[in-house]
Image (tube, rainbow, N blue to C red):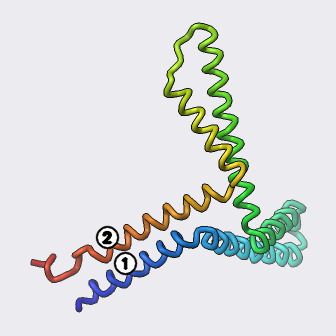
């Protein structure tokens, strides 16, 4: 077997396995990534504190404050990674929810003023508001769904890599 073909098969299988992991364990996948980010923040904070302690001439309160913030976020990500995911999606839900309410309000004002209003824009605003409510009451839903979509995309990519004839004898003819 050609070395390139062997590498492509291994690459395809690994991508498919990663996709399957994301598809069937989206929450665990997010937690792992967030924990790794938390560990990186903690390492950066320790480095910042060591630098702060050693460099007496270059000590600034902002450097100390940055290290403390890194420690706090790093610990939160390592201990309860889901908290940050939930917070981010709650903010997202509030943002799109307020946008949908503003769109509905503008549509109502326009209709009251006799200005024609697109039914499509009203339907879209209502659907956006429904999505915001779903995300607000179940913030992990969209996050898990997004990770699962990435998993599906990786599975498809892995199959494409695995099945692609590049580097095979047939493609050299």
Can you give x and y, in whole percent of width and height, for residue 166 in the image?
A: 23, 75
Question: Circle 1 sits in a helix, a strand or a loop, which is it?
Answer: helix
Can you give x and y, in whole percent of width and height, for residue 56 in the image?
A: 90, 73
Residue at 37%, 78% in the rendered image:
12
Q: CA distance from mark 1 to mark 2?
A: 7 Å
Q: Residues within 10 Å of mark 1 (few under 14, many from 20)?
A: many
Q: Farthest residue toward the top?
A: 114
The image quadrant of residue 110 is top right
Q: Earlier in the sequence, mark 1 or mark 2?
A: 1
Q: Is residue 171 above or below residue 136?
A: below
Can you give x and y, in whole percent of width and height, for residue 140 in the image?
A: 66, 59
Residue at 33%, 83% in the rendered image:
9
Q: Label 2 belongs to which residue?
A: 160
Q: State the residue in front, 5 or 125.
A: 125
Side (left or right) of 162 relative to 46 = left
Q: Label 1 belongs to which residue?
A: 12
The C terminus lies in quadrant: bottom left
Q: Are marks 1 and 2 in contact (CB under 8 Å)?
A: yes
């Amino acid at each position: 077997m050609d070395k390139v073909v062997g590498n492509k098969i291994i690459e395809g299988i690994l991508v498919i396995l990663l996709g399957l992991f994301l598809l069937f364990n989206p929450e665990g996948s997010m937690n792992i990534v967030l924990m790794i980010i938390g560990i990186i923040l903690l390492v950066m904070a320790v480095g910042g504190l060591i630098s702060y302690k050693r460099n007496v001439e270059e000590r600034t309160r902002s450097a100390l404050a940055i290290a403390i913030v890194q420690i706090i976020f790093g610990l939160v990500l390592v201990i309860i990674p889901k908290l940050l995911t939930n917070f981010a999606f709650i903010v997202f839900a509030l943002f799109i929810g307020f946008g949908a309410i503003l769109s509905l309000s503008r549509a109502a004002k326009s209709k009251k003023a006799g200005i024609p209003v697109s039914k499509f824009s009203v339907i879209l605003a209502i659907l956006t508001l429904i999505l915001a409510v779903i995300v607000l009451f179940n913030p992990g839903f969209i996050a898990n769904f997004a990770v699962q979509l990435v998993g599906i995309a990786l599975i498809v990519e892995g199959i494409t890599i695995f099945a692609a004839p590049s580097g095979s004898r047939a493609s050299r003819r």
